[in-house]
Image: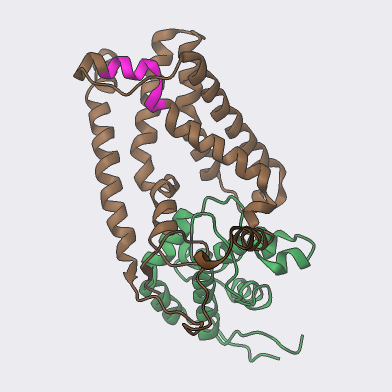
Chain colours: A green, B brown
Amino acid sequence: MLKQIEINTDPIQAILKQNRKEIKFGLSMCAHCSLCAESCFLFISNGNDPEYMPSYKFINSIGKLYKKKGRVSKQVLEEMRDLVFEKCVLCTRCYCPFGIDIPSLITLGRDVCRTQGLFREYDR
Amino acid sequence: MIGFLITFIKGPLIWISFIVFGGGLIVQTFRLLKLTQKKETRRIVPDKAFKPPTELSKKERFLRYLMSQRVNPLALNICLVLVSFIFHVCLIMTPIFVLGHNVMLDTAFGISFFSLPEQVTDIMTKFVIAGAIIFLMRRLLLRRVRIISTVYDYLLLLIAVAPFVTGFMVFHHVLNYNTIILLHVLCGELLLMMIPFSKFFHMVFFFISRFMIISEHSLGNPKRSWHY
């Protein structure tokens, strides 16, 4: 079991501030076309579950954090952990027709989770 | 007041929208390029073992291309790609080569592009509207698109297609001509001004990411990579 910790927004906001332009650009360029879906092998192997779409994963992890300026509850962060650690293996094979660097954005989501002591749970 | 607004929309606002469009594209392109940096390309395969694609026979090259396409998400969505391609080509070509716009250019400056027959631009406009309806239906009906859609996406689709719907109505004299033409000009100006500062900027970003930024799907000989 993971140690129960409270959310410390300072490191989250530091990551968001440091990568503000990149996150903003990725979010503002995503046309929500869902063409990236089939490039994710996890999407295909999980019965085309939309939660495995690369765009869904970055919009609902680092994108959500960016919009809420890092002020999220622990429950929301745990859901994000599931998205960026359990539903993505960072194989970097996602394809965006516009060229958004989705793996980098998911990596930032992982960075944020790590600062709060949230990692992949291997013993699930 | 209304008379002033009409004169403003049909006069200065056209200039303002073109200046915002052009200036905005330049500024946003520089801002995008600042997120990237020049990088030396590295070849992982040793030089002796490396067989450049040009040395392969045409058949081998074609087979390699087919092999690469079997995992291409675009090849898996070929219908959507075709609809999207036709939509975008018509979206860009129609306003440039439609007769009405060129007549105005000719009257104002004595220069114009060549014009396509009106029947052709009418069909192209119908393609744009049909494409927009397909995109809308996709957004409404497919769960994977709906789950990431926001109100803004629907609004952008409306803004993109509004000049074409009003243009179609103007051409076919549907409803009051003077009102619709004013609406057509206003929608066109709004679209032009929004291109550099919204998701429509993919008009430039698409080409920069394909031809200037190194990635698996880039074309040509790109030299830049993302900063992060």
Looking at the rendering, the stretch of residues picked out in magenta corresponds to B95-105
Give the residue at x 26% y 49%.
B26
Residue A2 spot, x, y in % from top left: 66, 90
Q: Is residue B201 magenta?
A: no
Q: Answer above or below: position of A121 versus A16.
A: below
The quarter of the picture where residue A114 lies is bottom right
Farthest left residue? B109
The quarter of the picture where residue B23 lies is top left
Q: Answer above or below: position of B81 versus B89.
A: below
Residue A49 can be seen, yes or no = yes
In depth, the one of A100 and B58 nearer the eye is B58
Q: Is residue B102 magenta?
A: yes
Q: Is residue B205 left or right of residue B105?
A: right
Residue B93 spot, x, y in % from top left: 43, 30
Residue A53 can be seen, yes or no = no
Q: Is residue A1 left or right of residue A111?
A: right
Q: Could you tell me what secondary structure mostly forms the magenta stretch?
A: helix
Residue A67 spot, x, y in % from top left: 47, 62
Give the residue at x 61% y 71%.
A76
Q: How many marks?
A: 0
Give the residue at x 50% y 81%.
A111
Q: Which image quadrant: the N terminus of chain B?
A: top left
In depth, the one of B178 and B163 nearer the eye is B163
